[in-house]
Image (spheres, helix red, strand yellow):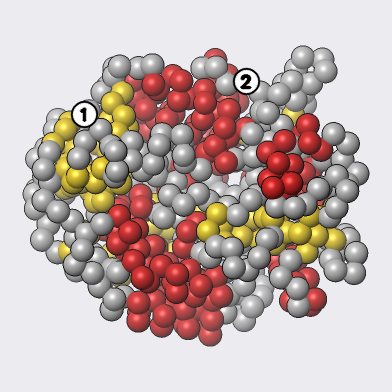
Amino acid sequence: MKLLSGTPGWTTTADVIVIGSGVAGLTTALNLRSHNLSVLLVTKARIDEGSTKWAQGGIAAALGPGDTPDQHKKDTLAAGAGLCDLAAVDVLVSEGPEAVRKLIARGAVFDKSETGEIALTREGGHLRNRILHAGGDATGAEVSRALLAAVQGDPGIEIIEHALAIDALKSASGRVCGVTLHVIGKGSLDGVGRALSRAVVVAAGGLGQVYSQTTNPAVSTGDGVALALRAGADVADVEFVQFHPTVLWRDLANRGQQPLISEAVRGEGAILLNHLDEQFMAGKHPQADLAPRDVVAKEIFNQMQISGQPHLWLDARKITDFAKRFPTIYTSCIANGIDPTVEKIPVAPASHYASGGVRVDLNGKSSVAGLYICGESACTGAHGANRLASNSLLEGLVFGARIADALANDLPGQEQPIEDTKTVLLDPKIVLPLQIAMSEGAGVMRSESSLRKTMQTLQELSKLTSNQPRIEAWEASNLHLLATAIVRSALERTETRGSHWRSDFPNISDKWESRVIESVDEDGNWHKRLEQVK
């Protein structure tokens, strides 16, 4: 099954195609080049417009005095609420420090303390200061800058900007051997074409635009996960969509990407307050305002239900030099009429990160030969039911390097694609009602009734088809496929765990220490099974 698109009018080739230009894609590309493999790097907008540059908090790694990978592991497992794969977490925390050192060697500059050491701060769920940051709250931008400088200086990496990867191409053996692309606007190539390769790495980021309000940029329509699903790959843990608890609240009419207020602000002493000026997180969790994100998001949602207000407050007025420590956040607040040095900041949860994605092994390999997944598009099992703060950039660094090593050791020759005649395409008009339905019925809190109502809406929207291939229709089709996967898994998991909150099943259940695995066959039929957590 594939999306309806035009006949490819051009062809290009490379040893490996990497889709996405965030930390995962750039790291993978650079490491592939260290093995002398040619790379075609495809990115949907400009090369610096992915989610990585929006990361405010930083990178978590056991680099501080007295800190160890084992302590980082314990915090990761606690946040993951019983669904982390131990082997994946071990890889993440043990290989993380060296991955960060390699990033620094590539030119990334992190903030220093007065003594000249790398300054480490703390975020929700961490029991130690282990978060590296740059430019105060512009860590992602610095990571992106350093990696882009290395990528753009490498003649062995061809970059195609403004290109949407539509579908995977498969050979007669069932192996992925390339992708169809549409170059948007003023791309270096024109229209629909095909890129052939010996393997494809999807590092296309998240799916935040499934919801009405998100911290994700407009390009985050889940294209990579949807491409993998249509290619027959397994996805896992997609019900665990993390809602960041503190996103600047502006107005319910504001949809799409919203300004993030990093939990590093709470790490520096800001406190959450309800409309009675009560510090409501006290007594709710041992770490209070710095509890894991799922805990804080749920409590904020509860307080909003009690007060009937669409937001709560974050009080950062006691933080000295706020504008210097958090220049990006300060500028964003001022632009929205709020001075955080003298006023409380209105905040509410918004979709932030997909802990699940395409199911992969420790080397990023999916269930489909030739298809590898890295970063937020992947489900390595390292995040479990709720990603620990600042483990996302680290995951891209660690697993990007592992994928490159695996491909260098096992990369077959180029195979030729065969034609897939089964197509689907939905009308772009479905996007707004889809986002509203997902936010209302499959957001922070879910129930059987809300999820079934959402599924009914999705089924009705699936009837609005289109015969006009264009980027808006491809994105709409991708969002619908992922929304369906999320709702199906959320209905299946009859418990509350991590970032999945069922009001009708409010407790965690031992029988659900397993993953919900989903796939779609070539006729569009859904299949699911459970996989025991290892």
Q: Residues within 10 Å of mark 2 (few under 14, many from 20)?
A: some
At horizontal 85% and vertical 68% (from top left) the residue drawn is 275
- Whether the residues at callouts 2 and 1 have beta carbons within 8 Å, the answer is no
Q: Quadrant of residue 40?
A: top left
Q: Residues within 10 Å of mark 1 (few under 14, many from 20)?
A: many
Query: How far across and down, in percent of the image, does residue 116 sit?
Result: 77, 14
Which of the numbered marks, if any, corresponds to residue 14? 1
Type of the residue with mark 1:
Ala
Task: Name the residue at 90% across, 64% down.
Answer: 277
Q: Which of 486/80 is in front?
A: 486
Q: Report which residue position mark 2 lands on.
A: 109
Q: Is residue 74 left or right of residue 373?
A: right
Q: Nearer the viewer, residue 219 or 379?
A: 219
CA distance separating discs 2 and 1 = 32 Å
Residue drawn at 53 percent across, 51 percent down = 216
Please state the horizontal and vertical placement of residue 21, each as a whole percent of the image: 41, 35
**SS for tag 2?**
loop
**Is there any visible trace of residue 530 in the rendered image?**
no
Question: In this view of the protein, which residue sits in the foreground, 132 or 507?
Answer: 132
**Of the pair 106 and 470, the residue shown nearer to us:** 470
